[in-house]
């Protein structure tokens, strides 16, 4: 069992007294005299140390009978970076819960995906987070409900089912218990939006831990965007989303203190999953201070970090899609990879209606690609074999890529596929699986940057040199890539 920060009382008290926003999401402060729980950066006068107890999750606070603070809104904190930097069962479970698996498949479905019994999963989550999977999912449903109550005009009954509640009564009881307000009172207290809302569009603010450098993050997504599926428009990255109950379209715009998110969903039940996948796409739950502090300890990387701190790893909303695109991008330029992908989208993607125009399809699923004629692929025969083998394994379920993937095990399975070398396996591990320590020593851009900076440029020597950057080598890759003038490193104009 991991020892969470919430067990270090002295450190937690210091964070609360300094109102350190860096620790929002790492732990929660429950105040014994008021019965409320807060984020560490809550703007109110800190309580006495003897009146504070600390919990590892909002769900644990709710289990202990505390209600959410109305000032700091702890339920809207960035997620704990723990769950995206670890590959153990608890971290994988938390990623799956965020992706709505408990709501859709129950605790038995969660346990089956992890390869454990329900009893083992419940015991591990309770030991580390102070709450079991049902309580964690319930806290997430309450947060989704609050979001819908405050940002939409949807009737409460529709919100209840969209947030994942089984009944309106359960929805009402949970909202009152967690927020000490009835759903109608929450809506009445919400700030009035004076701008005219577009029907069917949800406008949200996605929080993150500062600093966040948007240049390589949005630059990478825009430069590699597949026509019809993705685009950069009016300062926003827009793309289509394949979701459990339907499809969606999202527009993500960087701001100094948040990411503006506009979502159009075919089914409102997909809201929680859509938000979770957008956060993973932009790596918003990272702890940039911890990452940059370690990389800055290397005198070669320090100037790069100081010049543009807070770089994130651009990830993906669909691991299968990214794996397919990684194969399409083997040994070709970014432009050529986009062309290959665009042809597949036109021929095999699912058409969607974009009210704003510009986006036309969902990226084709592995099942849709498994039956294509390899001769239609404009690529060498060996790469056709790589492509067809990958999509067949994904479609058959022999290869699973997702939030619950075991990183070392999945990487080994990828390397066993024909045509899969270290670069392809590691770029999938980095961007699709979310491994923060994935490294690309054979990448041409990385080797070029290494030579210019005086680092070893051979893969073996560079890997040995990069051992000091662990467990954040995927972030080191972003800083090394940024030494180049490639469009992926610049926020589009």
Image (cartoon, rainbow, N blue to C red):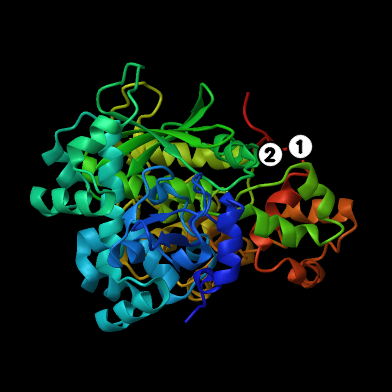
What kind of element bears circle 1? loop
* Residue at the image point whose x is 87% and y is 55% from the top: 451
**Looking at the picture, does residue 169 appear above or below residue 6?**
above
Label 2 Cα neighbours within 10 Å, binned few <14 / some 14-19 / many ≥20: many
**Looking at the picture, does residue 155 appear above or below residue 269?**
above
**Residue 158 occupies which quadrant of the picture?**
top left
**Residue 263 occupies which quadrant of the picture?**
top left
Whether residue 317 is visible here, answered yes or no, is no
* Residue at the image point whose x is 32% and y is 60% from the top: 66
Residue position for label 1: 485
* Residue at the image point whose x is 61% and y is 36% from the top: 219
Question: How many numbered markers are drawn?
Answer: 2
Label 1 Cα neighbours within 10 Å, binned few <14 / some 14-19 / many ≥20: few
Q: Nearer the viewer, residue 305 or 184?
A: 184
Q: Is residue 432 left or right of residue 490?
A: left
What kind of element bears circle 2? helix
Q: Is residue 191 left or right of residue 414?
A: left
Tell me the CA gap for discs 2 and 1.
7 Å
Indicate the position of residue 464 as horizontal and vertical percent values. Answer: 78, 73
Residue position for label 2: 489
User: Are the residues flagged by discs 2 and 1 in contact, CB closer than 8 Å?
Assistant: yes
Q: Nearer the viewer, residue 137 or 62?
A: 62
Indicate the position of residue 41 as horizontal and vertical percent values. Answer: 53, 49
**Looking at the picture, does residue 56 appear above or below residue 343?**
below
Q: Nearer the viewer, residue 384 or 39?
A: 39
Indicate the position of residue 387 as horizontal and vertical percent values. Answer: 46, 57
The quadrant the C terminus occupies is top right
Indicate the position of residue 486 as horizontal and vertical percent values. Answer: 71, 38
């Amino acid at each position: 069992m991991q020892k969470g920060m919430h067990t270090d009382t002295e450190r937690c008290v210091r964070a609360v007294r300094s109102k350190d926003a860096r620790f929002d999401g790492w732990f929660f402060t429950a105040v014994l005299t008021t019965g409320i729980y807060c984020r560490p950066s809550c703007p109110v006068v800190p309580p006495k140390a003897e009146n504070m107890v600390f919990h590892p999750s909002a769900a644990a606070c709710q289990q202990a009978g505390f209600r959410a603070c109305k000032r700091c809104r702890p339920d809207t904190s960035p997620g704990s970076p723990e769950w995206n930097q670890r590959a153990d069962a608890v971290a994988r479970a938390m990623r799956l819960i965020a992706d709505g698996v408990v709501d859709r498949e129950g605790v038995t479905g969660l346990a089956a995906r992890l390869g454990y019994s329900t009893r083992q999963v419940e015991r591990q989550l309770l030991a580390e987070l102070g709450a079991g999977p049902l309580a964690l999912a319930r806290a997430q449903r309450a947060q989704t409900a609050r979001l819908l109550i405050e940002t939409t005009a949807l009737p409460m009954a529709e919100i209840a089912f969209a947030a994942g509640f089984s009944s309106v009564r359960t929805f009402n009881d949970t909202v009152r218990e967690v927020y000490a307000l009835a759903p109608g009172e929450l809506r009445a207290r919400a700030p009035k939006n004076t701008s005219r809302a577009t029907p069917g569009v949800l406008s949200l603010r996605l929080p993150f831990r500062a600093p966040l450098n948007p240049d390589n993050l949005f630059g990478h997504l825009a430069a590699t965007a597949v026509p019809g599926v993705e685009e950069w428009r009016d300062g926003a990255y827009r793309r289509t989303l394949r979701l459990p109950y339907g499809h969606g379209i999202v527009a993500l715009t960087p701001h100094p203190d948040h990411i503006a998110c506009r979502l159009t969903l075919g089914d409102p039940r997909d809201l929680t999953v859509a938000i979770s996948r957008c956060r993973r796409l932009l790596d918003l739950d990272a702890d940039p201070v911890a990452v940059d502090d370690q990389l800055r300890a290397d005198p070669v990387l320090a100037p790069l970090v100081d010049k543009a701190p807070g770089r994130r790893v651009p990830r993906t909303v669909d691991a299968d899609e990214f794996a397919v695109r990684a194969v399409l991008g083997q040994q070709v330029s970014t432009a050529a990879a986009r062309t290959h992908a665009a042809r597949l989208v036109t021929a095999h993607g699912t058409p969607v209606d974009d009210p704003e125009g510009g986006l036309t399809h969902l990226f084709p699923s592995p099942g849709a690609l498994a039956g294509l004629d390899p001769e239609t692929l404009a690529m060498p025969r060996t790469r056709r074999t790589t492509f067809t083998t990958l999509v067949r394994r994904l479609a058959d379920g022999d290869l699973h890529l997702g939030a619950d993937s075991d990183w070392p095990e999945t990487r080994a399975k990828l390397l066993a596929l024909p045509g899969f070398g270290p670069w392809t396996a590691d770029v999938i591990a980095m961007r699709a699986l979310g491994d923060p320590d994935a490294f690309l020593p054979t990448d041409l851009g990385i080797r070029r940057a290494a030579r210019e900076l005086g680092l070893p440029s051979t893969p073996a020597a560079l890997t040995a040199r990069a051992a000091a950057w662990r467990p954040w080598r995927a972030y080191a890759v972003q800083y090394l890539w940024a030494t180049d003038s490639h469009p992926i490193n610049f926020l589009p104009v």
